[in-house]
Image (cartoon, rainbow, N blue to C red):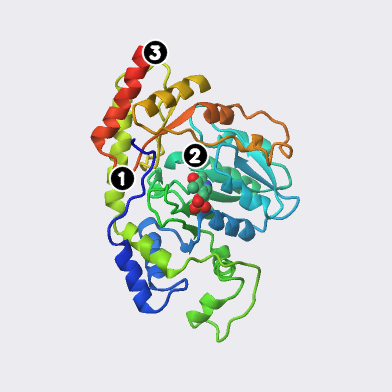
Amino acid sequence: MIPFNKPFLTGKETQYIEDAVASGKLSGNGIFTKKCHAFFESKFGFKKCLLTTSCTDALEMCAILANISTDDEVIIPSYTFVSSAVAFVRQGAKIIFADSYKNNPNIDPQQIEQLITPKTKAIVIVHYAGIACDMDAIMAISKKHNLIVIEDAAQAIDSYYKGKPLGSFGHLAAFSFHETKNIISGEGGMLCINDEKLLLRSEIIWEKGTNRAQFFRGEVNKYGWMDIGSSFLPSEVIAAFLWAQLENLDAIQTKRKAIWNMYYNTLDSSNLERIKLPVVPNYASQNGHLFYIVCKSIEHRSHLIAYLKGEGVHAVFHYLSLHDSPYYAEKHDGRALKNSDMFSNRLLRLPLFYNLQLTEAENIANLIINYEQNN
Ligand SMILES: *Cc1c(COP(=O)(O)O)cnc(C)c1O
């Protein structure tokens, strides 16, 4: 069976973990953590990076930094992972779910403006499949209405909007290194702070509400309790693992993008009537995070999943609309979000991982073509 995902190891992970252990400093913000921060800040131009124990944690830091509280409204796409919303719900916010575009699961900026009220405080956007949202449009809305923009860039490492890295647009951005993402550390994430005004406070929240990071830099002569916070920083063991992955970022990305292109080009060349391919707008890039197709109906998708399974290929659907979830349906304002529901019912993801052979991707695409031509 070709699995949907298989975590990739570069081979250096355990050596770097041994180095971290031998160094005698195992808690967070040590040598490997600083190497990872410097790598991201210099390669992608993020103003400041802080590793976190997950992307979910980074989003929780965003909610704290944005001062989200009861009565605030936060606009979030419905077609996303739970964490995009749950971090803000924990701070007491009311979530105003927004719909996707018709031809792309990303949030449709044209809809955002109609959802803004005097209570709106922030917009969370998700670059689905690592394909950029329309950042010019979103940042213009943010400026006009004085709203904080948070990029859920969990899937968007090394992807770009008009050549500028995703994660560098919003006031804040969150990345994931969960084992299902391009670059992994088992569980892991990162907060990027692009708004100068949030820099100092972000470090304090990261370090349990203390100014310990400033103390270790010699900027203050003792440290103490300054604010709310939590233990958001990962240990050096996690950072050491992540560093082994980052050293191989370019090779990982090259291979993943080649698999994506193999799927796209093979399926595109046979013009299947019932299957839609991902739309990458002119302003966006693909980063080989995930490859999806959109089926004609939920039944069509179920049959295709069963057929692929019979042929030894594990293909999986993705999110269920959050506005319709058991937890939030009652709290949702009742608006129908047709496009989000459509992607919930019809989007199907194909296997994509570093060790998948290009010929295997081609075969999977050909299985789909074969199914479509005979059913
Ligand atoms: C994976 C993912 C997350 C959660 O990441 P964790 O590191 O597992 O917390 C959040 N949002 C999106 C869009 C994701 O794909």
Specify the quadrant of the image occupied by residue 283. top left
Name the kind of residue labelled 1 in the image. Tyr
Q: Nearer the viewer, mark 3 or mark 2?
A: 3
**Residues under labels 3 and 2: Cα distance?**
37 Å
Q: In the rendered structure, are the residues bearing label 1 and label 3 in contact, judged by CB atoms less than 8 Å apart? A: no
In this image, 75 relative to 256: left or right?
Answer: right
Residue at left offset 31%, top offset 54%: 9
- Which comes before the other along the chain, label 1 or label 3? 1
Disc 3, SS:
loop
Q: Nearer the viewer, mark 1 or mark 2?
A: 1
In this image, 319 relative to 43: left or right?
Answer: right
Name the kind of residue labelled 3 in the image. Asn
Disc 1, SS:
loop
Q: Position of residue 215 (x, y in %)?
A: 53, 81
The answer to whether any part of residue 171 appears in the image is no
- Image position of 154 with respect to 189: above or below: above
Disc on res. 375: 3
Q: 20 or 277, which lies in front?
A: 20
Disc on res. 134: 2
- Which comes before the other along the chain, label 1 or label 2? 2
Specify the quadrant of the image occupied by residue 357. top left
Residue at left offset 57%, top offset 76%: 211
Name the kind of residue labelled 2 in the image. Asp
Disc on res. 354: 1
User: Assess mark 2: CB under 8 A from ligand 1?
Assistant: no
Disc 2, SS:
loop
- Which comes before the other along the chain, label 3 or label 2? 2
